[in-house]
Amino acid sequence: MTLRAVIKAGGSAGVDRDSVADLVADVARSDEIVLVHGASAETDALQERFGHPVETIISPSGHQSRRTDRRTLELFAMAALGIENFHYVEKLQARGVDAIGLSGLSGRLLVAERKVVRAVKDGKTVILRDDFTGTVKAVNVPLLRQLMAPSRVPVIAPLALSMENEAVNVDGDRVAARIAVAIEADALLILTNVAGLLRDVNDPASLVAETTLDEAEGLAQGRMKKKILAAREAIEGGVGEVVIRKATGDPRVRTVIHA
């Protein structure tokens, strides 16, 4: 029986591309896989190189994200498509997988609503009117299904086209969740640079091996909050299981999240 899954590879430093490519290639030989990847570390490096400092914003609900003005969006596209997507397609091809590099802009694969971005600054909530981030509202499933097959993997950078036909940055974890729901995936696997959800972020031994969505939301801190939000969107959309684990190391060291 052919299974269907979405794998999200984080873009942070410490996420080894070769380990991700090994896993994707191994699973893709028999099952249908979509790979979504981030590009945060490469974007940080490009912003520093081009003298455009990274700014992190915190929403009123406590979620952290990158401040994305137009210049940051362009540098993110350079990092996501020009570096990360390039490397993953090359590495998967070298492993015998027919990888197809895309972004959500390609063929209107991902259509998003541009956000009204609110951030907390100095204890006050402000609106950032020049921020180019969005929330995915539609996935071009017929296009995606044409590209999915055993040993053929769409590799997707998290950019989308807004309803006003502007490019926007969209959160990679939530993109992966949205695609998983759209293609009726059996599972969503989020590969990152930490072992999974920790009860104490300073204690790697406090890994939560299995948890519910409600418990996970109560424990999540920092950037893990977005991953748990993605897990909720996936599971509530019908995806059977969400797993968060390191891209390298023992695959049994992980957090499994269910309803």
Image (spheres, helix red, strand yellow):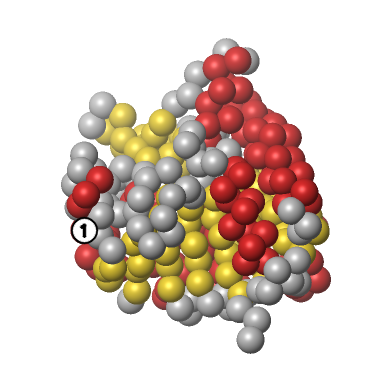
Q: Give amino acid for label 1.
A: Gly
Measured from the top left, where is residue 168 in percent x and y? 62, 44
* In the image, residue 56 above or below residue 184: above
* In the image, residue 161 above or below residue 234: above
- Which residue is most to the bottom? 1
> Tag 1: Cα neighbours inside 10 Å, few (<14), some, or many (≥20)?
few
| Location of residue 78 by image quarter | top right
* In the image, residue 161 above or below residue 71: below
| Location of residue 48 by image quarter | top right
Task: Please state if 167 lies on the left or on the right of 118 as rendered.
Answer: right
Where does label 1 land, which residue? 218
Which residue is rendered at x = 49% and y = 34% of the image?
Answer: 13
Measured from the top left, where is residue 218 in percent x and y? 21, 58
Residue 237 appears in the picture as rendered: no
Viewer-proximal residue among 89 and 146: 89
- Which residue is most to the front? 250
Q: Quadrant of the N terminus?
A: bottom right
Which residue is rendered at x = 49% and y = 62% of the image?
Answer: 189
Task: Please state if 252 lies on the left or on the right of 134 as rendered.
Answer: left
